Amino acid sequence: MKIYQKKYLENLRKTARISEYGNDRYKDFDDFLTDRSRRQDLLLQYSRENTGLLRDNLMPLLDDILSASEEDIRELTEFSGALMGDHKDTVLQYYISYAVVTYARKYGKRDLLIRELYQTGMSLYYLESMMRRVNLSRYCWKMRMMFGEAASFIRIYDEIEDTETRGYIHRAMGNLALTYSVLNQDGLHKKMAAIRNSLEILNDPVYQEKTPSLPWDIYIYKSHQERTAALGGLRENCGNLQFVREVMESAQYIHASQLEASRMRGEPMQPQWQYAYEAAQYHCGIFSLSDLMHALEGIYTGISPKDFSQQGMFANVFLPGVYASYMAKEPDFLQSKKSVLTYMYSRLIQYMKSAPNDRNQERLFFYLLSTVMTFVEYPGGIQLKDLAMELIAARGPLTYIHSGMTARLAKLMAEEAVEKIPETLVGIAGTGNIEEVRLKKEDICSQAYNSGFLHDVGVLNFLSLVTLTGRQWMEEERLLFQFHTSAGKKILAQSQSTKLYAAVAEGHHKWYDGTGGYPDLYVRPEGPEAILTDLVSIADKLDGMTDDKALHLRKAVSLDDAVEKICREAGTRYAPHFAALLGPLRPRLQKILEEGRREAYAEIYRMTADQD
């Protein structure tokens, strides 16, 4: 690799270490705060250096990729491979691989083209995985193009002599299944067809004889693993008898392999594949729903709440969501299994607080969001509102600080509005007139506070982007992160305790007059949701501009400058009647920004101390 590429990777490693949190390194809380500022300065330094390295060296090469030398391309692919590994700069890796695809296609570098089509598809898959956690999609069609073109070279298989390239053809063909969702009938149908076609070729002795050194057993095994993912579609009643039969076939294949491996290791079968086998038996009619629930409980209790391996994460984090999904098929189970599910949720919270920050983070968040999306609320039990706050604190401490500050500021503005402009709050907390607004001040302020605290819950789905502090965001990352508003809406809209705040999560970045911001398709609602969104939009911006310790890559501004900017954009970006409150509130705002923020950081400090 070139010197700048090695330096970039070194800086990524440094920023990853700097971005870690925990208070075991600190003498006291003041030392913790001092360290936050020091880290912010270092992150700015490394970010600017890395951004400069890309701007001065990489981007000119990518812009003129057809003029690159073969040595340039070799170094680019090595750099891209490192970015795809532990460093996980997926978007940059995507840009590089896609540029190399252009080069390879232009100059007829067939082996290089096939490999980079596959690598581009894989980088898109990792980005799409973030969207799928909350049933959104953005990259499927691009993935399909990349994998599909690579797989199409099966037509001239005999002309391709390189064994590794032939392997990429088979892998791309199998990965076409990744481009389809199992949560709708059409997607499930196409996914199953893709796996069927891939397995037909993988099991063909003609191809195996042509390239005997390829790991055929691994390819076949992974195809069966992917077919068991169709259980998600079967849970949603999207399948048919053929799909059920094929899933059962794959579940049995994996079960037999896992059973033999577990015997050799002298260990229990891995929970993920034990679940797949038990669930497939239910969908085939071998098991009753009661049998399946009992089997899931056995799998769950067989894993330690301190097992942070991938299989431990599956059982502790994903399995409660699966359990809740099957519970919903039988209303009687919602009550009879209440204590079981409540225990699972309580253990989930503790697990998320204790889980380490390591390379398994992406899988952990996939499992977590899957469970959140099937969350079942019980009167007097754990509410989604409380669970969301706990999870934000556990896995996104800086988002928790920002959410807490936004909540405090929104509440203060609501208190002032009740006193000065109560007519602007009519509708919140069921109020119908000014007098009711004054009588229900406490309820109104509580809703404002909750709106602020939950407005960024969708960020849970994109924490890997938030923690990417090694450089400035690229356009693709900025656009991807904008989906945190839609993700937040989907998470909050499903439960009674959070339904009111779904519109706030979706609309807090949309301009007051609708002329700017995102999401594009957001339609400003009428009633209390719009009022709460207006309050949170201002509170969110006020905190974001003034926090000098958060690990973002911009310098904080003074309160006066922040207020001036908001007031300057009143009527377009912000609600003018609420923006007008900021001037008179300045002393109290300053107090919250100083004392409230200190307390928010102290909460994180104490939480990490409790984990130790």
Image (spheres, rainbow, N blue to C red):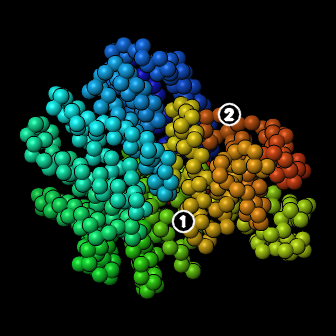
Residue shown at 84% from the left, 68% from the top: 426
Is residue 515 among the parts visible in the rendering?
Answer: yes
Give coordinates of residue 550: x percent, y percent.
62, 42
Residue that badge 1 annotates: 387
**Mark 1: amino acid:** Leu
Q: Earlier in the sequence, mark 2 or mark 1?
A: 1
Nearer-the-camera pick, 267 or 333: 333
Q: Secondary structure at mark 1?
A: helix
The answer to whether residue 61 is left or right of residue 303 is right
Give coordinates of residue 58: x percent, y percent.
47, 20
The answer to whether residue 106 is left or right of residue 264 is right
Q: Which mark is residue 537?
A: none
Q: Secondary structure at mark 2?
A: loop
Nearer-the-camera pick, 321 or 185: 185
Residue 159, above or below 397: above
Residue that badge 2 annotates: 555
Label 1: few (<14), some (14–19) or many (≥20) C-alpha neighbours in 10 Å = some
Is residue 532 among the parts visible in the rendering?
Answer: no
Give coordinates of residue 409: x percent, y percent.
75, 54
Nearer-the-camera pick, 469 or 424: 424
Give coordinates of residue 144: x percent, y percent.
38, 43
Residue shown at 12% from the left, 36% from the top: 211
Label 2: few (<14), some (14–19) or many (≥20) C-alpha neighbours in 10 Å = some
Nearer-the-camera pick, 408 or 289: 289
Q: What is the quadrant of the N terminus in the image?
A: top left
Hey, which residue is sitting farthest front in the picture? 155
Residue shown at 82% from the left, 52% from the top: 575
